Image (spheres, rainbow, N blue to C red):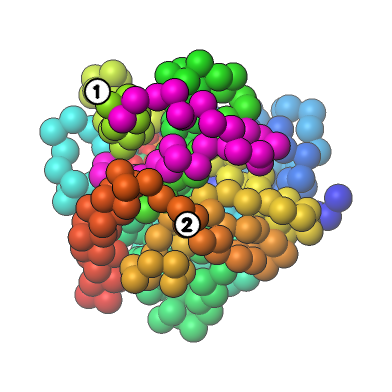
Amino acid sequence: VPERKVAILGAAGGIGQPLALLMKLNPLVSSLSLFDIANTPGVAADVGHINTRSEVVGYMGDDELAKALEGADLVIIPAGVPRKPGMTRDDLFNINAGIVKNLCSAIAKYCPHALVNMISNPVNSTVPIAAEIFKKAGMYDEKKLFGVTTLDVVRAKTFYAGKANVPVAEVNVPVIGGHAGVTILPLFSQVTSLAQTVATPQANLSADVLTALTKRTQDGGTEVVEAKAGKGSATLSMAYAGALFADACLKGLNGVPDVVECSYVQSTITELPFFASKVRLGKNGVEEVLDLGPLSDFEKQGLEALKPELKSSIEKGVKFANQ
Ligand code: APR
């Protein structure tokens, strides 16, 4: 198994800590680098006592960012502030966009060949910000930049299995578009079993149920924000999803064939420059962006409906990066 260094930026946060734990359990990782502006020595000491393969090192503060990134094969970014009730999207945007901009400038400098998994929200904008920063630094490789939308897939699977009364671990649901509200479009017409043979339990679900499932998937983040009542947004499920996607990226890097996950990447699959869809992962990151497949009329409408918001979120990111 090749040596792989994984760096987590924002590793002491609500997402970062369980993500550090899950990456420590991943046998594909040989070196786990935990960076944050505070508290990483403690997290690293704690996680580092676990008797799995990787060596764990904590890095704290801007002075240690270079060391945290050097030699990284994969950088996962959950740094930022979470959405709280009453917080406007603009409040969140300005803080997180600034953090992402700085961290991406450092990635361009210290590990320009690493794959980057963006978790910091709003992902619809932070991924275009990263792309712009990388372009300015002259090292942008669109095959290596990913917005992590795996939590939308995880939620779609869970909610769907509950309604269709099928085993949750056997369902796969592609989710396309973006990573916020109506830009999230689960394709319940393309539910497959894990064996990739087409399952047809969706045939038993009424249009009303499919509409409700779509809405619940789109509002999944808000459901958690409201349930946490002022204490933040999804952390444990997001860490799980982030670890799942990172594992897929590492498998791709290691040459495992047919690793396909949905992710928000640069593509020409629609007229939008960034779009989440099924992506085949390989030794250089994105090997192939798979086409969307046949959509139901409901999904076709959803696709057209999401484009204006996704387009403006992308433009907002590009503008921020260049101002
Ligand atoms: N560099 C590194 N880490 C940073 C920086 C920075 N410049 N600024 C903040 N952080 C760290 C914080 O110190 C904290 O440990 O990011 C972590 C964020 O953790 P939480 O505040 O607990 O937030 P969390 O719930 O983990 O969400 C983080 O992920 O899904 C998104 O919307 C979510 O954008 C938010 C982010």
In the picture, which quadrant includes the C terminus? bottom left
Label 1 environment density (alpha carbons within 10 Å; few <14, some 14–19, many ≥20): some
Q: Which residue position holds label 1?
A: 226
Element type at marker 1?
A: helix
Q: What is the tally of numbered marks visible in this picture?
A: 2
The residue at 54%/31% (across/down) is 200
* Magenta stretch holds residue 171: no
Q: Which residue position holds label 2?
A: 292
Q: Which mark's residue is nearer the viewer, 1 or 2?
A: 2
The residue at 55%/61% (across/down) is 290
* Magenta stretch holds residue 183: yes
Q: Are marks 1 and 2 in contact (CB under 8 Å)?
A: no
Q: Quadrant of residue 54?
A: top right
Label 2 environment density (alpha carbons within 10 Å; few <14, some 14–19, many ≥20): some
State the residue in front, 195 or 44: 195
Give the answer, above or below, for where 21 lies relative to 166.
below
- CA separation, marks 1 and 2? 32 Å
Q: Position of residue 2 (x, y in %)?
A: 83, 55
Element type at marker 2?
A: loop
**307 left or right of 160 in image:** left
* In the image, farthest residue toward the front: 203
The residue at 30%/44% (across/down) is 298
Q: In the image, which residues are magenta? A: 179-207
Which label's residue is closer to the chain start, 1 or 2? Answer: 1
